[in-house]
Every structure is written in C-alpha cells, then in structure tokens.
Image (cartoon, rainbow, N blue to C red):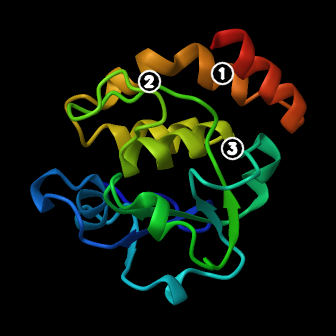
C-alpha cells in the first residue's frame, strides 16, 4: 500500500487504546503507513485540525488549507469525558453522517476513526485520500455509498450557515 503524500495532508491518530484492538481502524491506518500514531494529547501538532464531535465549529472546505488532520481514537462510551480536555489544535466536528462500520452501521455520528478521517478529507476537497483510507476495509466503500450525496453537498458549502442548511435539508 502506497503512503499518502505527506506534503499534501498529514494524518495523525491519537490512540487511547480503549477499544478492541482487533477492530481499531486507527491502528490499521498506522500499520499501513497511512497515519502517524501519537499516544498523548500533548503530541498533537499545535496547528492541526482535530476531529472532535463535541467541538462548537463544524469542518468546512476552507479548512483544506490546514496540513495536519488528527482523529482521536477512543471509546464512544468515554468520548465525552476524553474530548472535553484542553486539546491542542483547532477543534472541528463533522456534520451529520451515517456510519458504515459493522458496530454502528447506519447510526448518525457514530463513525469509526477511519470514517471520520475520510469524511474530513472528502469535505476538505481530498476525496482521493478518503478513497485510499477506506479501501483498507471491506465495508469502506459502503461509507461512501451511504454518504455520497451528503459529502458532495458538504464539500461545496462556503459557510457554517450554508452547511447547517444542507444538513437540515437531509436530516
């Protein structure tokens, strides 16, 4: 598997090791050289975009100018506590999307780390990265199929208000 162009978008996964290691999509991305692994919050690059479902601001295509993208891999049961810490970087949440992973299939917002990174990359105008990340998983293409219209619409939004309207139209 070829590495993603590092100068284009650097992907990082903060592994908190709270889930079944055999189902950890973030660890698999690191294993195949598609993401850098970090183990402590303080290792998050300061000017990175950090995917955080508790963030006030939503990710927009304009965020595509940011070079580092971080997913925090933690248990959904512990996410609220973990993600309320003082986390370095620019916190952004994803708009509503449907999970395709076997654990949370078709649930809103319950994305795996790879789904979150792929969705962010897609919205930021890097759909080729989304395809590459999801290609590691049998169900990866299903994520794109389930969310294709949404991702296309979100990736064309020019403001949070416009994205919020798109989200409201679909949900």
Residue carrying label 1? 152
User: Percent position (x, y) of residue 30?
Assistant: 30, 66
First reached walking from the N terminus: tag 2 or tag 1: 2
Identify the residue position indicated by label 2 in the image: 144
- Quarter of the image for residue 40 reads bottom left
Q: Secondary structure at mark 3?
A: loop
Q: Residues within 10 Å of mark 2 (few under 14, many from 20)?
A: many
Which comes sooner in the sequence, label 3 or label 1?
A: 3
Residue 4, percent from left and from top:
45, 57
SS type, badge 2: helix
For disc 3, the marked residue is 124
- Identify whether 34 is placed above or below 53: below
98 up-or-down from 55: above or below: above
Horizontal side of residue 78 vs 53, given as left or right:
left
Mark 2 → mark 1, Cα distance in angstroms? 10 Å
SS class, disc 1: helix
> At x 33% / y 27%, what residue is drawn?
100
Q: Is residue 22 left or right of residue 100?
A: left
Residue at the bottom extreme of this rendering: 42
Mark 2 vs mark 3, CA separation in Å: 15 Å
Q: Residue at x 48, y 40 (%)?
A: 130
For the point 57% across and 68% down, the residue is: 84
Mark-to-mark CA distance, 3 and 1: 11 Å
Disc sitting over residue 61 in the figure? none
């Amino acid at each position: 598997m070829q590495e993603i162009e590092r100068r284009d978008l650097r992907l990082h996964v903060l592994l908190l090791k709270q889930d079944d290691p055999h189902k950890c999509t973030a660890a698999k991305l690191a294993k195949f050289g598609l993401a850098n692994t970090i183990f402590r919050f303080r290792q998050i690059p300061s000017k990175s975009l950090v995917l955080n479902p508790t963030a006030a601001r939503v990710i927009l295509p304009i965020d595509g100018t940011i070079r580092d993208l971080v997913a925090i891999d933690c248990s959904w049961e512990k996410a609220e506590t973990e993600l309320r810490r003082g986390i370095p970087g620019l916190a952004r949440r994803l708009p509503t999307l449907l999970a395709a992973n076997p654990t949370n299939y078709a649930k809103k917002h319950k994305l795996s780390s790879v789904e979150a990174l792929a969705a962010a990359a897609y919205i930021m105008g890097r759909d080729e990265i989304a395809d590459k990340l999801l290609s590691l998983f049998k169900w990866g293409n299903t994520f794109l199929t389930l969310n294709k219209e949404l991702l296309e619409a979100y990736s064309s939004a020019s403001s949070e208000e416009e994205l919020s309207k798109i989200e409201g139209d679909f949900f």
